[in-house]
Image (spheres, grey):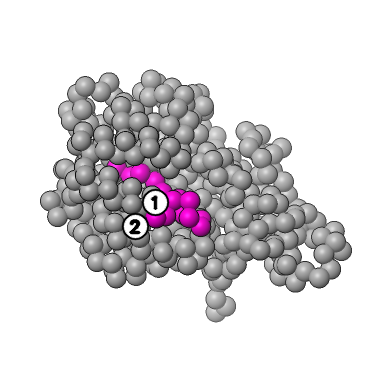
Amino acid sequence: MQLIRGAIHHYPTATTQYHAGLQSFADGGLLIEDGKISDIGDFSTLKAQYPDAGIVDYSGKVIIPGLIDTHLHFPQTEIIASYGEQLLTWLDNFTFPTERRFEDETLAAQMAEVFLTECLKNGTTTGLVYSSVHKVSTEALFRAASARNMLTVAGKVCMDRHCPEWLQDTPESAQRDSAELIEQWHGKGRNYYALTPRFAPTSTREQMAALGELAQQYDDVFIQTHLSENHDEIAWVKTLYPECQDYLAVYEKYHMLRPRAVYGHCIHLSDSEWQRMADSGAVAAFCPTSNLFLGSGLFDMAKADEFGVPVTLATDVGGGTSFNLLKTLGEAYKICQLRNYNLSSLQGFYMLTQGAAVSLGLNDRIGNLNPGSDADFVVINPRFDPLSQLRIGADSTCEDTLFALTMLGDDRATVATYVAGQPQYQQQEV
């Protein structure tokens, strides 16, 4: 039994009232037992109630739920910040050659370690992760995440056309490999599987149909793919699937539009697509740094609000330019400014924690610090360098502190990241 002390902020329930829904304890305590949160409240009260608990004192620091990144590519870790190109040429010139190397199980295991360390160093405890087309790379990622006891949603990328021949699978192998991975990993420990067609242009109708069969057979698995990121991509889909009324209709046709389906980008959707997204319970993953880096466009939060589509935030590494979700939130704020939408730091904080968990149907386990939830949380030092010490006062509000960190913060602010009650990352003293 451990009692973790610090300033605590989290959303205990689903809400759209981001000020009223926030639960805070200026000098708070988090009681951890057997990898779960068993109590939360004022530190002095919990200390008196649980005199035998060992105390871990983070006074002056901020404790928040582990952050949830809903769209990122682990094989692209090493090509982050590669110069130039828009989406389709970026895939050809950087992504595909790099992902070829992940047929090597040893390399995939090494890169999984690097990838997960970067996530934890930046306070991310759960990711919805794209692997490569190789089954062994997905297995390597699940093994590495399981060693840390991280709640991970991941899937083998499926693509059987419009990519190099040496990176293609087939409808049959995509279905077989995905089914075997589901049986091996989905719901085992803290692992979940996501059916992962890269995007409609790289899958034939036969492959989409094969994956659609799995989506119907395994109705509790996740689905992750890309949607309406780039104008050229959208035009390409129209030529490849002329029988479908729009891009979303391709996934709809193959039984992939449903709850727990997470669509990356969703920048250029029609009103009809927004409405069908909302009706289905699918989720839009807003990827601000990659949208800017690849010149794809500006996500429309107002449209998502209008139609009631759940929106989460994502780094989209390696098209995205940072593993840090607070910094990613800062870029989302700037995009929303250009769209005349007021994205507050509290709304963004909700989107990175409880909001993401609710959208994914995982809020009974992650996204909050409620008793009974898994003890995934991050300890942040908001005054981590001279400039942040100047900007953020000791008595700054949660909202102001978070906003400043989205503009000024990086992994130096992460003191420790706990996964299921164990510190899986701790900042080294210099």
Which quadrant is home to the C terminus? bottom right
Residue 92 located left or right of residue 62: left
Mark drawn on residue 390: none
Task: Give, as a three-letter code, the residue at label 2.
Answer: Thr
Frontmost of labels 2 and 1 is 1
Which residue is rendered at x = 29% and y = 56% of the image?
135
Q: Residue at x 50, y 23 (%)?
A: 306
Tell me the quarter of the picture where residue 86 sits. Answer: top left
The residue lying toward the viewer, choosing from 131 and 119, is 131
Residue assigned mark 1 = 183
Residue extent of the magenta highlight: 184-197
Residue 244: in magenta span: no
The foreground one among 26 and 13 is 13
Q: Which residue is mark 2?
A: 138
Q: Residue furthest bottom?
A: 430
Compared across the picture, whether 390 is left or right of 176 comes to: right
Q: Is residue 29 above or below residue 311?
A: below
Element marked by disc 1: helix
